[in-house]
Image: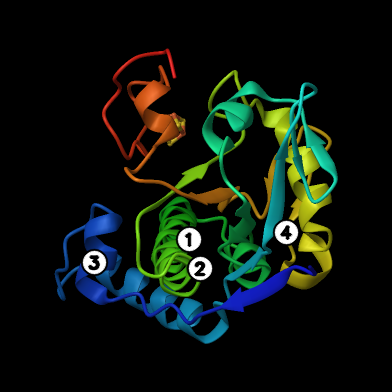
């Protein structure tokens, strides 16, 4: 199956954006004008994109094989055992916002532009997860495995994931650096799979001060 492009608009609701930026809306302050101006600019160009596909799963002695591509990482074999199909994906805030944000040298403007990219990423990710939930999991529970946060699927695991997705660069503008980091940097990648209860890498990740934590740490053991 070819990978599928998913897009959805982002709206940057003012109240939520100020909260995310940890700034107060005050019409008498210049900072407020800067946020509102950059928000307007971002609204005109934002075009976050996701790419995903449906892949068949085979668990072997060598590791997990998805559509013929080997993932020799123990996390996948543990969590995907019994699955017939899964949904690998990559998404980002979009190259348009990313390039736009690099044009600011003023520290406050650069901070706001970066925060707008993060906001776009999370708003879009929420839309994408909802779309996947409805269209692929019949509205039921599902979870995601993500490379890079746990030793059992380290950052090098981006390589087979991007090989599996095939054309993330041409379709969605998402590429990998030689250190396996995604560009644009405000991005996420992983594999969605059906689950009875929600699984989060965060529950086993020792980065206790991570600002993006989505679940309490329980134990290193998975
Ligand atoms: S705590 Fe942070 S680094 Fe660790 S898995 Fe969660 S989001 Fe990733």
Label 3: element kind: helix
Distance between the Cα atoms at labels 2 and 4?
23 Å
User: For the residues carrying marks 2 and 3, which lies nearer the camera in this image?
Assistant: 2
CA gap, disc 2 to disc 3?
A: 29 Å
The quarter of the picture showing ligand 1: top left
Dot 2 corresponds to which residue?
136
Q: Residue at x 43, y 77 (%)?
A: 10
Q: CA distance from mark 3 to mark 4?
A: 27 Å
Q: Residues within 10 Å of mark 2 (few under 14, many from 20)?
A: some
| Crowd tier of the residue under label 1, counting other residues whose Cα lies within 10 Å: few below 14, some 14–19, many 20 or above | many
Please say if 104 is above or below 7. Answer: above
Q: Are the residues tagged 4 and 1 within 8 Å (C-beta)? A: no
Helix, strand or loop at mark 2: helix
Q: Is residue 143 left or right of residue 4?
A: left
Q: Is residue 49 left or right of residue 218?
A: right
Image spot of residue 102 (x, y percent): 63, 59
The quarter of the rendered structure image containing the C terminus is top left
* Quadrant of res 34: bottom left
* Above or below for 103 versus 13: above
Q: Which mark is residue 174?
A: 4
Disc sitting over residue 16 in the figure? 3
Query: Do the residues bearing badges 3 and 4 touch, measured as CB atoms within 8 Å?
Result: no
Q: Nearer the viewer, mark 3 or mark 4?
A: 4
Q: Position of residue 201 (x, y in %)?
A: 44, 32
Q: Which circle's residue, 1 or 2, is located before the other in the chain?
A: 1
Q: Ligand 1 within 8 A of label 3's CB?
A: no
Dividing the picture into quadrants, the one containing residue 99 is bottom right
């Amino acid at each position: 199956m070819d990978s599928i492009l998913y897009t959805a608009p982002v709206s940057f609701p003012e109240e939520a954006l100020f909260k995310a930026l940890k700034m107060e809306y005050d019409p008498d302050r210049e900072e407020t004008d800067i946020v509102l101006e950059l928000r307007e600019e971002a609204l005109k160009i934002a075009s976050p994109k996701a790419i995903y596909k449906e892949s068949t799963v085979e668990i072997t002695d060598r590791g997990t094989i998805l559509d013929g591509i080997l993932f020799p990482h123990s996390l996948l074999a543990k969590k995907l055992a019994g699955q017939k199909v899964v949904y690998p994906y990559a998404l980002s805030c979009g190259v348009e916002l990313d390039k736009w944000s690099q044009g600011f040298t003023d520290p406050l403007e650069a901070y706001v532009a970066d925060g707008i990219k993060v906001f776009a990423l999370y708003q879009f990710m929420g839309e994408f997860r909802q779309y996947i939930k409805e269209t692929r999991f019949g509205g039921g529970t599902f979870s995601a495995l993500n490379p890079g946060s746990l030793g059992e699927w380290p950052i090098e695991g981006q390589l087979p994931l991007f090989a599996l997705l095939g054309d993330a660069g041409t379709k969605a503008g998402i590429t990998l650096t030689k250190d396996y980091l995604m560009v644009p940097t405000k991005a996420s990648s992983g594999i969605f799979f059906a689950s009875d209860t929600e699984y989060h890498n965060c529950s086993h990740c020792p980065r206790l001060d991570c600002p993006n934590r989505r679940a309490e740490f329980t134990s290193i053991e998975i």
